[in-house]
Image: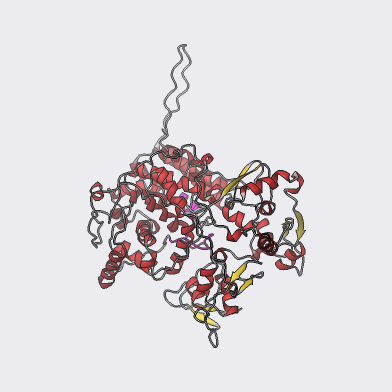
Amino acid sequence: MPVRLLASLLLGIPSVEPPAPQAPVAQASPAVRPPESDPQRIQRLRLLVEAAEKALEEEDDEALARLGEEADTLTADWSPDLLRQPEVQALLQRMKDAQEPEAGDEPAEPEPGLKAQDEVVSITGDELRAELERVRAAEQGASYDYPIDLNDKVLTWVNLFTTSRKGFMENALGRASMYLPMVRQVFAEEGVPSDLAYLALIESGYRNDANSRAKAVGMWQFIRSTGRIYGLNGTAWVEERRDPIKATRAAARYLKRLYQISGDWYLAASSYNAGPLTLERAIQNVGSRNFWDLHRSRWLRTETKNYVPELCAAILIGHNPERYGLHVLPLTPYAYETVTVSSMTSLTVLARCAGTDAATLRALNPELLRGSTPPGTYALRVPPGQAVDCLRQLARMPAGQRLDFKNYTVRKGDTLAKVAKKFKLSPEDLLAANDMEARTFKVGKRLLVPPPPSQTLDDRDLASRTSGTKALGDRPLKPLPSLPAELDRQTPPAGTPVAEPPPARDPAATAAPAPLAVSSEPAASPIQVSAKPAPVPKVKAPAKEAAPAPSAKVIHAKAGDTLAKLARENEVSLGDLVRLNPEAAKVLHPGDRIQLPEGPSTPAPRPPKAPATHVVQKGDTLSSIARKHALDMADLRTWNHLKGDRIVLGQKLRLTP
């Protein structure tokens, strides 16, 4: 959204500054510019649209964003009659098309979020009644602080999320488990309903690296102009829209401001998706501020119409996924300590200082765009318990060793593994240092080669075992730390009462839970609404994992190994392997210790002859196919030359190299 317009609309800054007080001495009156006529305004808008279309052809993103901001600023004070003119509507649509590419373009994000672009036919009859009974059974005793209308639209999305989109929901809820404690803490501090944490699941599937066709970035999918209004800046080194802490704080304030504008949480969520100006224009055309009236009109895009039902369904399922038949593998909560890095330093060097690897630092600091911290001072997040050691090693390190990268040009016959071995690195460290993927490793590519680690992961594990200290993977995580004070000076100090959230849409609903009722019309009240956000759960340090029995079999992962591959090679169940090695389920590095299950009940017998292909059936996803055949999704993509996870009905997939 435009910076000047949103600063006025969302932050409450007056769009017209009051006149300055007159000085006591007489001064010459400044020339007053006569007001523009409607034809002159339309002509200015036409020039901006034509310039934006030219910038789109030249792929000048900065100019395109600037022209979009100028167009929105120009039309901000236009009368509704002027905005309704066909000529103006056509120009605004052309500007919108220039800002957002057509839906037929290939999406930039590797794994799209849940936001649906297509019309969805609501379930009816017996299916609708069965889905209602299932929701009622699953939600007994549950409490929500976001209003939920149990109508046919919401129940349809509950059905879709637990059938055809079940695989994506399981993966997204698994990633959400890492960030939900932090998100709920931030939302409680900002006075936003904690159930809105599932909005990130709809937006991006809780992926910090998600990118949309409209150039929205990060877990909360901010476009650049809106992100700047809420303090999310970007440089060639850092993109703060990918920072989970800062972006969550910005999303909470944006949602709170949208609620103050609209007075309704459904309208606030719709504004988050479509933009406040788009929603206000739809409200003016429909003549109603009820979301379901807007849903039945033609003034909202299909994606925006689906947005609120998707969000309500995600909240219902997210509270009790196991009651809906979903199997979610929880991840370790997002926890860290902060180290102040005084000058630009490569992540590989910092990883050695922090006793970890570059991949872990990139996961804790997804806002970093390159293989190093930016020039100047930077607050780097490191694993819990590693800050002091990292600071000590940095203090002793000469400045010349902080960026001791070498240059190397990929030659004919080189492979990623070969080049990494030549410089005593792992392929993952080499890719991380160059912010690249394995598929972009080509002849002629110029690489920055970081220095090799002082100890390999195998050596570090061996040293920790012989010295009696715990290895990194065996250390229990400390409780989730409080948010860094430098992120927000307005964050209430410890002991300050948390502000109550804005009231629910129906104040009477707070007195007692209303009975659930099915209807294609908006429900009279939510299932159950609490007056205050749900308390932020305290994250307890996980108990120390029991050491494997002396007779337990332990292997070490090699380069290229995945848990699915190890399960096939050792004829064990992939589920048992994930349960015994939860850290390896997140990321697996060469040298990691993998414990294999014991006993006759755990091994999964290898079928006499594995099928070579799989024909995509109705309801299949790439994730469900991988689980069915005990394969890794990355292998399926490679063997079938897939860029993302999209598959079509009837497509034949290879199940072998």
Q: Main secondary structure of the magenta part?
A: loop
Q: Which residues are magenta?
A: 95-114
| Residue 22 visible from this viewpoint | yes
- Residue that appears at 40% across and 58% down: 303
- From this view, report whether residue 599 is shown above or below residue 433: below
- Residue that appears at 22% across and 58% down: 515
- Residue that appears at 49% across and 63% down: 104
Q: For this view, does 484 lie left or right of residue 154?
A: right
Residue 407 image position (x, y, % from top left): 76, 56
Residue 577 lies in quadrant? bottom right
The quarter of the image holding the C terminus is: bottom right
Q: Nearer the viewer, residue 599 or 395?
A: 599
Question: Among all residues in the image, which is located at the extreme bottom?
Answer: 608
Q: Nearer the viewer, residue 83 or 362?
A: 362
Q: Nearer the viewer, residue 20 or 517?
A: 517
- From this view, report whether residue 398 is shown above or below residue 417: above
